[in-house]
Amino acid sequence: MTARIEHLVTSGTFSLDGQTFDVENNVWLLGNDDEVLLIDAPHDPDAIERAVGNRSVVAIACTHAHDDHVRSAPELAERLIAPTYLHPADRVLWDLTHSLHEPDAELHHGQIIEVADTRVEVLHTPGHAPGAVCFSVPDLGVLFSGDTLFKGGPGATGRSYSDFPTILDSIRGRLLDLPPETRVLPGHGDETTIGAEAASYDEWVRRGS
């Protein structure tokens, strides 16, 4: 059965550097009637568990370890009997939220995750966070971009463990070579395409932050 994409929005908070903000997070599920890959585990584990239903979960794949993307990861890993995947460079952020729980496995650039006969490629895209990753699904023409790329530009880099030149390098070197029609499904907000965002790259460089 062909893999499909399902979308859920959850509400909660994001806290870092002594500040807390209300946020809404996109949760993406990629799979079929039998199995899914869960991309990020933010708020409302009950709603996420309902969205998964009776399907097996190949992995809880975290785009990065800011608390609004991983807060429910250990609980969901236990409920869904699923491993949590995280890039090792983001352990510094993960440990701020889950000092008593380790991720189950590491994500690395070029790694392939298979779900519902579909290949998902891990792209390491640091900048918003040191271990930020995107998940490219060429067969579906989709990129799950986490907080690396949004409709309107790069993810925020004004907080600890983030860097604007680094995120620009990640986007230019790892994302803009994807087909321009590639759908970009981010961690927050509306979807866009690689082509729509590539047109503004020089403007982001001039902006400088």
Image: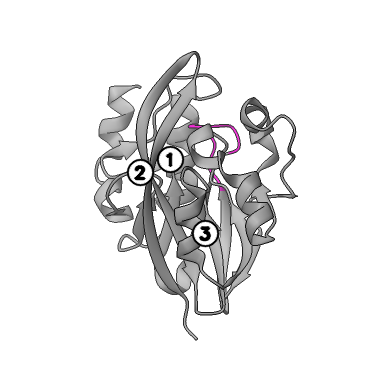
Q: Earlier in the sequence, mark 1 or mark 3?
A: 3
Magenta span of residues: 124-131
Q: Nearer the viewer, mark 1 or mark 3?
A: 3
> Is 113 within the magenta?
no
| Rendered position, 123 above or below 148 | below
Residue 162, given in percent of the width and then of the height, sits at 51, 25
User: Residue lying furthest front in this view?
Assistant: 46
Please name the residue that numbered disc 3 is placed on. 49
Mark 1 touching mark 2, by CB under 8 A? yes
| Rendered position, 29 above or below 203 | below
Q: Residue at x 49, y 53 (%)?
A: 46
Give the structural element (helix, strand or loop) at label 2: loop
Q: Residue at x 44, y 58 (%)?
A: 28
Q: Which amino acid type is marked by label 2?
A: His
Q: Which amino acid type is marked by label 3?
A: Glu
Disc number placed over residue 147 in the picture, else none: 1
Label 2: few (<14), some (14–19) or many (≥20) C-alpha neighbours in 10 Å: many
Disc number placed over residue 188 in the picture, else none: 2
Q: Which amino acid type is marked by label 1?
A: Asp
